Image (cartoon, rainbow, N blue to C red):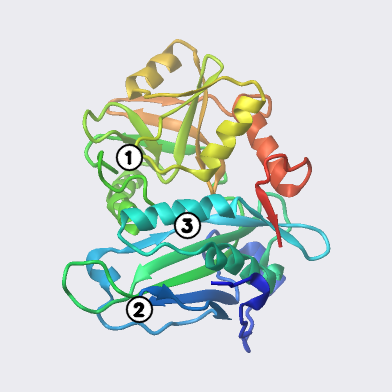
């Protein structure tokens, strides 16, 4: 396939919804831009992508995704540049992760010419939807799902790939309060925890709702075997600062390999800040806090980037995590990552793709 951003056909909407007020006031994921990219898979191959107006799409009454859950997605961002330009942050890494999810979910892989070139073309069409205010960006959501109708339990033979975008301000306005979950489990070894599939998120919603009823934002996931070791913070990877070292659980099949996580760990190491990817028990977190050795903690992900943790509860005990300050390891690395994405410092890793 020889698809390039310039060769993708564009059908522009005749009823644009864009306004600066709508763009700049939209909550995360609440307002979609005017266009989407669509590509269809059938007869063993991907068809040519096209950009069309955002709106309802035809689906058969019994799409396979609704029965057997073959649905995956990604999430990354575009940031504004001067003279109407923009940059995408690490789209190649998101493309690679989506194809790993395809492999795990028995779905056909997506060519870079559709994923990356398609994203560039779509962002170019809807460039005006990128907010300019600090902390904001255009959130990009590629999604792929099975559309086949036969009810046999097997991989679908047809799929649809869609890229949609939405203006996004800061995901969290303050510290994130979590309650360690010891009833429900997000992932088990050998499961789909490392894939970005919809079932992982559906399975976590009940736990999140119960946490919110108790006055917390979400749950701190523990491992599925011993219910002892920390894995993720709600919808994000998690990091702790203990005795000046940034500690985060290791990837091992039950934790999503976050692109922001990888970026943060890379920058921390370059800054000379010790990093440890190792198992960390929930008891160790509370003991470190009691000894004055816990110096901060945060969720790390695309939507929030670095979201400091506030209250943390496990069973009948509760602590308040020390705040992340500009001088702390997490404050410093967050500022460095923001400087790279906004162009204030050089993109020394080649993480940005200009549009």
Residue 267 image position (x, y, % from top left): 63, 32
Q: Which disc is residue 198 wearing?
A: none
**Residue at image point 42% right, 62% down:** 109
Front-most of 333 and 313? 333
Residue 87 image position (x, y, % from top left): 70, 56
Question: From the viewer's perspective, is 92 left or right of 124?
Answer: left
**Residue at image point 48% right, 75% down:** 39
**Residue at image point 65% right, 47% down:** 351
The number of callouts visible is: 3
Q: Earlier in the sequence, mark 2 or mark 1?
A: 2
Mark 2 or 1: in front is 2
Q: Which residue is mark 1?
A: 254
- Tag 2 secondary structure: loop
- Tag 1 secondary structure: loop
Residue that sits furthest to the bottom in the current view: 14
Q: Which residue is mark 3?
A: 74
Q: Are marks 3 and 1 in contact (CB under 8 Å)?
A: no
Is residue 22 among what the camera can see?
no
Q: Count residues near mark 2 (Cα–Cα under 10 Å), then give few for <14, some for 14-19, many for 20+.
A: few
Q: Earlier in the sequence, mark 3 or mark 2?
A: 2
Question: From the viewer's perspective, is 65 left or right of 116?
Answer: left
Q: Which disc is residue 43 wearing?
A: 2
The answer for how far apart the CA atoms under marks 3 and 1 are is 17 Å
In the picture, residue 81 is in which quadrant? bottom right
Is residue 232 among what the camera can see?
yes
Residue 272 image position (x, y, % from top left): 65, 21
Residue that sits furthest to the right in the current view: 83
**Residue at image point 53% right, 38% down:** 262
Viewport quadrant of the C terminus: bottom right
């Amino acid at each position: 396939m020889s698809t390039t951003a310039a060769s993708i056909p564009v059908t522009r909407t005749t009823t644009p919804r864009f306004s600066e007020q709508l763009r700049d006031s939209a909550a995360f994921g609440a307002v979609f831009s005017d266009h989407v990219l669509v590509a269809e898979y059938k007869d063993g191959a991907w068809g040519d992508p096209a950009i069309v107006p955002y709106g309802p799409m035809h689906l058969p009454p019994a799409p396979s995704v609704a029965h057997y859950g073959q649905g995956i997605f990604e999430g990354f961002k575009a940031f504004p540049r001067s003279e109407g330009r923009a940059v995408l942050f690490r789209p190649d890494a998101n493309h690679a992760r989506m194809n790993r999810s395809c492999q795990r979910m028995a779905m056909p892989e997506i060519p870079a010419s559709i994923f990356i070139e398609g994203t560039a073309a779509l962002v170019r069409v809807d460039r005006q939807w990128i907010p300019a205010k600090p902390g904001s960006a255009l959130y990009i959501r590629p999604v792929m799902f099975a559309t086949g109708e036969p009810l046999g339990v097997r991989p679908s033979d047809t799929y649809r790939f869609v890229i949609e975008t939405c203006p996004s301000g800061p995901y969290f306005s303050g510290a994130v309060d979590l309650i360690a979950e010891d009833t429900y489990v997000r992932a088990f070894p050998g499961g789909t925890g490392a894939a970005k599939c919809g079932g992982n998120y559906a399975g976590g919603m009940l736990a999140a709702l119960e946490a919110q009823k108790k006055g917390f934002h979400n749950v701190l996931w523990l491992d599925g075997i011993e219910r002892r070791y920390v894995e993720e913070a709600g919808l994000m990877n998690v990091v702790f600062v203990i005795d000046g070292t940034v500690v985060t659980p290791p990837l091992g099949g039950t934790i999503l390999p976050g692109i922001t996580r990888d970026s943060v760990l890379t920058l921390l190491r370059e800054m000379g800040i010790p990093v440890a990817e190792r198992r960390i028990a929930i008891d160790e977190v509370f003991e470190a806090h009691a000894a004055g050795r816990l110096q901060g903690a945060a969720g790390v992900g695309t939507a929030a980037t670095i979201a400091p943790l506030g209250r943390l509860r496990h069973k009948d005990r509760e602590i308040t995590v020390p705040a992340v300050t500009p001088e702390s390891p997490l404050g410093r690395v967050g500022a460095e990552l923001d400087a790279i994405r906004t162009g204030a410092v050089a993109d020394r890793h080649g993480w940005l793709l200009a549009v």
